[in-house]
Image (spheres, rainbow, N blue to C red):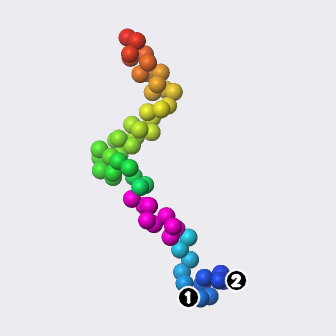
Amino acid sequence: MKSQANQTGQTNQHMRFHAPHLHLGVPFGTDIFGRAAELFALGFGTPYFLTTQTLLVIV
């Protein structure tokens, strides 16, 4: 069974509302610095990172 949109000749663009915001997907960019910054940011709030930083500050 075809959908209503396909019967009228329109394509089903289920991501059409996300298209204007695609530039927000990579906040630090796609270059080497951006990827490294994103990896650092992902681990920034983890318990391992916080424990390591605490130990470094104490020592």
Residue 2 drawn at (x, y percent) = 66, 83
- Going by the numbered disc 1, the residue's amino acid type is Gly
Q: Does the magenta stretch include residue 4?
A: no
Residue located 48% across and 32% down the image: 45
- Which numbered mark, 1 or 2, is in the foreground of this view? 1
Query: Looking at the figure, which quarter contains the N terminus?
Result: bottom right
Q: What element carries label 1?
A: loop
Residue located 29% across and 50% down the image: 31
- Give the residue at mark 2: 1
Left or right of residue 55: residue 29:
left
Q: Any mark on residue 9, and which?
A: 1
Mark 1–mark 2 distance (CA, rounded to whole Å): 15 Å
Residues rendered magenta in the picture: 15-23
Q: What element carries label 2?
A: loop
Structural crowding at the residue carrying mark 1, measured as other residues with C-alpha within 10 Å and reported as few (<14), some (14–19) or many (≥20): few
Query: Looking at the figure, which quarter contains the C terminus?
Result: top left
- Going by the numbered disc 2, the residue's amino acid type is Met
**Callouts 1 and 2 close, C-beta under 8 Å:** no
